[in-house]
Image (cartoon, rainbow, N blue to C red):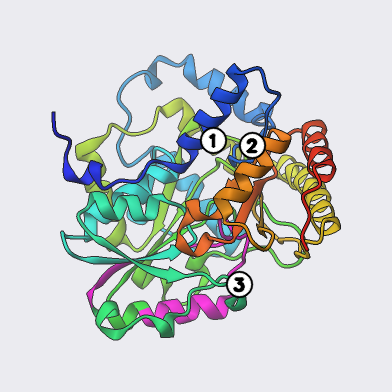
């Protein structure tokens, strides 16, 4: 049996490879500590779980939901945008529910990208941007995210002939994996660029609420003209520790939301309504739980940065996200260093090359590990003799 070319061309999903490596080591009896995958270790707040339980018992929620999402869910998203960012979005025409933001990110290229078209993809970046482009028959043009540019793409470096062919530009700030923040001035440049070349901007804003010192991360939709050219993907996954609940949204330009909504009516049946009501509770609920999560992540971040710097790494603390992005020691490729760390310590970290060619030379550590296990992992790392020269 011959698989379709789009599947043959698809690289193995990075996290699936990591999970297999972990499973094999555990079967061999090794004590493994994974700092690899960004899956929050803390539970979803009780008030959200309670809302799910209540609504799951309501027979009215046992039927097919609307593909675009409950009106009350879309209104809650719109209200949240108004409170958090001062942004007005129309819940009827400018918001659609998603089965997690990953689903929408993967599917939006099908709405705007024809075979042979080009999408602008950040590198290093979330692998789904390229995968969705591939499934739509498009080609990814890499926008390098370089440390000397603050891990922001250099729009002026995109050739004019490429920009004229481009259909979508994917962005993600605060950024996974680098932890970088975008400025309002950068987003303004993006809007001007997108208008000049008629490009759809798709901003992945999964980490806006996981932030530490300084001003809070901004929304792309805050920038004047953003709703003329783009949409923003949001999710409660990292904010409320709801990664397994599979709910998210896209908000922004109605001419971009409508094709995505239309696509979804043909390929899925929406999000279980009880989960939507639970997400509403999160969006409308008290923010103390989120602040508490950030306090815990901040302490873990500081501990990791302190440990890496004691080994000679010399990195700065990221101001947002649940990740530490750090260079590998001189003389190593990222995959070689990650394997060395795993073999010598039983600690799993993620090779930067898994996020694209410009991730080479780096590795990523996730903050989503209980404090005692994180301290054990860092103790093993310090005792391993691995150092930066």
Q: CA separation, marks 2 and 1?
A: 8 Å
Give the x, y percent position of residue 229.
35, 71
Highlighted range, magenta = 165-193
Q: Residue at x 80, y 38 (%)?
A: 380
Q: Quadrant of the N terminus?
A: top left
Give the x, y percent position of residue 191.
41, 77
Circles 2 and 3, Cβ within 8 Å, touching? The answer is no
**Helix, strand, or loop for circle 2?**
loop
Q: Earlier in the sequence, mark 2 or mark 1?
A: 2
Q: Residue at x 73, y 42 (%)?
A: 293
For mark 1, what is the residue?
A: 243
The quarter of the displayed image where residue 83 is located: bottom right
Give the x, y percent position of residue 118.
25, 67
Is 193 in front, or is 388?
388
Vertical side of 73 occupied by 333: above or below: below
Does residue 180 show up magenta in the picture? yes
**Helix, strand, or loop for circle 3?**
helix
Q: Residue at x 55, y 42 (%)?
A: 236
Residue farthest toward the front in the current orientation of the protein = 331
Vertical side of 341 occupied by 158: above or below: below
Q: CA separation, marks 3 and 1?
A: 29 Å
**Left or right relative to 305: residue 125:** left
**Helix, strand, or loop for circle 1?**
helix
Q: Quadrant of the C terminus?
A: bottom right
Circles 3 and 1, Cβ within 8 Å, touching? The answer is no
Q: Which mark is residue 147?
A: 3
Vertical side of 208 occupied by 152: above or below: below
Circles 2 and 1, Cβ within 8 Å, touching? The answer is yes
| Mark 1: few/some/many CA within 10 Å (<14, 14-19, 20+) | some
For mark 2, what is the residue?
A: 40
């Amino acid at each position: 049996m011959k698989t379709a070319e789009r599947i043959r061309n698809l690289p193995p999903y990075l996290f699936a490879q990591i999970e297999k490596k972990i499973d094999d080591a555990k079967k061999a009896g090794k004590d493994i500590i994974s700092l690899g995958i960004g899956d929050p270790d803390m539970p979803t707040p009780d008030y959200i779980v309670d809302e799910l339980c209540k609504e799951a018992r309501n027979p009215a929620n046992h039927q097919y939901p609307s593909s675009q999402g409950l009106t009350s869910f879309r209104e809650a998203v719109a209200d949240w945008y108004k409170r958090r960012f001062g942004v007005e979005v129309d819940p009827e025409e400018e918001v659609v529910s998603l089965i997690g933001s990953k689903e929408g990110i993967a599917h939006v290229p099908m709405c705007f990208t024809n075979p042979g078209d080009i999408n602008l993809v950040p590198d290093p970046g979330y692998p789904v941007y390229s995968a969705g482009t591939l499934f739509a028959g498009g080609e990814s043009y890499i926008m390098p995210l370089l440390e000397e540019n603050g891990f922001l793409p250099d729009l002026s470096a995109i050739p004019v002939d490429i920009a004229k062919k481009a259909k979508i530009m994917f962005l993600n700030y605060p950024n996974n994996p680098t932890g970088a923040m975008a400025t309002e001035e950068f987003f303004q440049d993006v809007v001007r660029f997108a208008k000049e070349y008629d490009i759809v901007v798709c901003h992945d804003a999964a980490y806006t609420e996981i932030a530490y010192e300084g001003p809070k991360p901004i929304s792309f939709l805050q920038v004047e003209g953003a709703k003329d050219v783009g949409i923003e993907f949001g999710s409660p996954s990292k904010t409320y520790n709801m990664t397994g609940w599979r709910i998210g949204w896209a908000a922004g330009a109605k001419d971009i939301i409508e094709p995505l909504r239309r696509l979804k009516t043909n390929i899925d049946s929406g999000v279980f309504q009880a989960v939507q009501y639970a997400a509403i509770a999160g969006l409308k609920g008290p923010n103390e739980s989120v602040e508490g999560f950030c306090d815990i992540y901040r302490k873990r971040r500081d501990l990791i940065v302190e440990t890496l710097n004691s080994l000679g790494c010399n990195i700065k603390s990221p101001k947002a996200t649940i990740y530490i992005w750090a260079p590998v020691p001189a003389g190593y490729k990222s995959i070689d260093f990650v394997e060395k760390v795993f073999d010598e310590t039983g600690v799993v970290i993620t090779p930067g090359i898994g996020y694209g060619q410009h991730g080479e030379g780096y590795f990523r550590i996730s903050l989503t590990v209980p404090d005692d296990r994180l301290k054990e992992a860092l103790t093993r790392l310090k005792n391993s003799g691995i150092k930066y020269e």
